[in-house]
C-alpha cells in the first residue's frame, strides 16, 4: 500500500480545509459557507486566537534567544573537538537524531491533540491552545511570525543544550571524546526538535516558499505538504509525526496510536479528542 493511500482524495476533500485555495474556499455547501467548518472566520478559531497572551509572547521570545545562544556555543565546541575520522559518526548521529525528533514530534503532537483541555491551569491556554486553533484554522500557523511559531519547540531543547554546554566547559578533552558520538546525536536531535514547528509551518504554506524548501519537501527530506494534509482530515486521528513524517506510515500500519488511545481509555475512561471536538463545534 502506498503511504498516501490511507485516505482517499474524496475523503480528504470532504473532511479537510483546502489550504492550497487562496480564497480559503473550503465550504462544500451553503450551510458551510454560513457556518465555516475551518478557517480564520470559524468562531472557535477566533476565540482561541484571542487567548494568545503578552506573557506567553515573552516566554517564547526568551526561549528563542536562550536556545540560539546555547546552540551557537555548543556548535563551537563540537567543531573544536571534531576529528575528521569521526565524520561517519556525525552522519549516523544526524540520521538517528532526525528519526528520534520525528517520533518525539508525533508523541507530543498526539498527546496535545488528543488529551486534556484548554481550560487546564497554565498548560491549557499556553500550550494546548495552539493545537486546538490549528485544527479549525490550519492556515493560522502561516500567519504566525518566527517567535510564535517556534518559541515552545526552542524552549524544549534548552535543558539538554545547557547540560551539554556545562559538560564541554567542565570535562577534560579525553572525557569529551569518550562521549562525542552521544553529544553529536543530542545536539542534532535538539536542532531538529527546535526546527520541527518551522518545518510544520512550511507544510501549510502553499505559496511563496523558497525553492530549496520545496525541494526538501518534494524529496520527503522534511514534511511534505500533501503528506501532512492527511493529518488534517477530521477527526485528526492519524499522521501525527511532523518533522519529516517518515514514521507516519509504519506507525499507522502498527496501529500504534489507536493502541495507545485504547489503553488510556481502558485505564481512565477518558476518550481522545473530546476537547478538540468541542472547539470544532463552535461555529456560530
Image (cartoon, grey):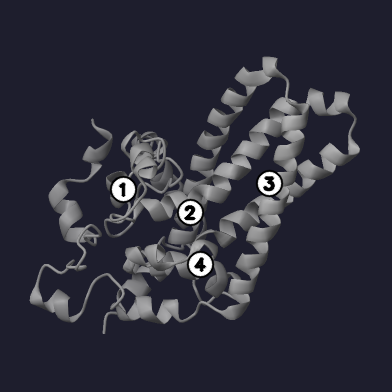
Calculate the distance from the C-alpha at mark 1 to the C-alpha at mark 3: 28 Å
- Dot 4: within a 10 Å radius of its alpha carbon, few (fewer than 14), some, or many (20 or more) residues? many
Task: Say the numbered circle drawn on residue 128.
Answer: 4
Disc sitting over residue 71 in the figure: 3
Please state the horizontal and vertical placement of residue 165, each as a whole percent of the image: 79, 43
- Residue denoted by label 1: 225
Looking at marks 2 and 3 on the same chain, the residue that comes earlier in the sequence is marked by: 3
Q: CA distance from mark 2 to mark 3?
A: 17 Å
Could you tell whether 8 is left or right of 39 in the image?
left
Which image quarter holds the N terminus? Answer: top left
User: What residue do we see at 35% from left, 78% from top?
Assistant: 44
| Numbered disc 3: secondary structure | helix
Q: Residues within 10 Å of mark 2 (few under 14, many from 20)?
A: many
Please tell me whether residue 192 is drawn above or below residue 182 in the rendered image: below
Side (left or right) of 196 relative to 284: right
In terms of secondary structure, where does tag 2 sit? helix
Residue 59 placement (x, y as % from top left): 64, 69
Earlier sequence position, callout 4 versus callout 3: 3
Spatial CA span between label 1 and label 2: 13 Å
Image point (25%, 60%), residue name: 19
Instruction: First in sequence, mark 4 or 2: give its number.
Output: 4
Please state which of the two labelled residues, at mark 2 or mark 3, is closer to the viewer: 3
Rendered image quadrant of residue 251: top left
* Residue ID for mark 2: 197
Q: Quadrant of residue 104?
A: top right
Element type at marker 4? Answer: helix
Q: Nearer the viewer, mark 4 or mark 3?
A: 3
Picture quarter with the C terminus: bottom left
- Residue 263, relative to residue 79: is it above or below? below
Q: Nearer the viewer, mark 1 or mark 4?
A: 1
In the rendered image, the residue lying farthest to the top is 85
Amino acid at each position: 500500500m502506498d503511504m498516501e493511500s490511507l485516505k482517499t482524495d474524496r475523503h480528504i476533500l470532504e473532511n479537510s480545509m483546502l489550504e492550497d485555495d487562496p480564497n480559503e474556499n473550503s465550504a462544500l455547501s451553503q450551510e458551510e459557507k454560513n457556518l465555516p467548518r475551518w478557517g480564520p472566520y470559524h468562531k472557535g478559531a477566533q476565540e482561541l486566537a484571542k487567548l494568545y497572551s503578552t506573557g506567553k509572547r515573552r516566554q517564547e521570545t526568551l526561549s528563542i534567544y536562550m536556545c540560539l545562544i546555547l546552540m551557537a556555543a555548543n556548535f563551537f565546541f563540537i567543531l573544536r573537538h571534531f576529528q575528521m575520522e569521526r565524520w561517519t559518526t556525525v552522519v549516523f548521529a544526524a540520521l538517528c537524531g532526525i528519526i528520534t525528533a520525528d517520533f518525539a514530534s508525533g508523541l507530543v503532537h498526539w498527546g496535545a491533540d488528543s488529551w486534556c483541555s484548554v481550560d487546564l491551569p497554565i498548560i491549557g491556554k499556553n500550550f494546548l491552545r495552539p493545537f486546538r486553533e490549528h485544527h479549525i484554522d490550519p492556515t493560522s500557523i502561516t500567519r504566525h511570525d518566527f517567535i510564535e511559531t517556534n518559541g515552545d519547540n526552542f524552549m524544549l531543547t534548552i535543558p539538554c543544550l545547557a547540560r551539554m554546554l556545562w559538560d564541554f566547559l567542565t570535562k577534560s578533552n579525553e572525557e569529551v571524546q569518550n562521549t562525542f558520538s552521544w553529544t553529536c546525536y543530542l545536539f542534532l536531535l535538539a536542532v531538529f526538535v527546535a526546527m520541527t514547528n518551522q518545518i510544520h509551518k512550511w507544510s501549510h504554506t502553499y505559496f511563496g516558499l523558497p525553492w530549496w524548501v520545496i525541494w526538501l519537501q518534494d524529496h520527503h527530506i522534511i514534511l511534505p505538504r500533501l503528506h501532512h494534509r492527511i493529518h488534517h482530515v477530521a477527526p485528526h486521528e492519524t499522521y501525527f509525526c511532523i518533522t519529516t513524517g517518515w514514521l507516519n506510515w509504519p506507525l499507522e500500519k502498527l496501529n500504534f496510536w489507536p493502541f495507545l488511545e485504547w489503553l488510556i481509555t481502558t485505564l481512565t475512561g477518558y476518550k481522545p479528542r473530546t476537547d478538540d471536538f468541542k472547539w470544532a463545534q463552535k461555529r456560530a
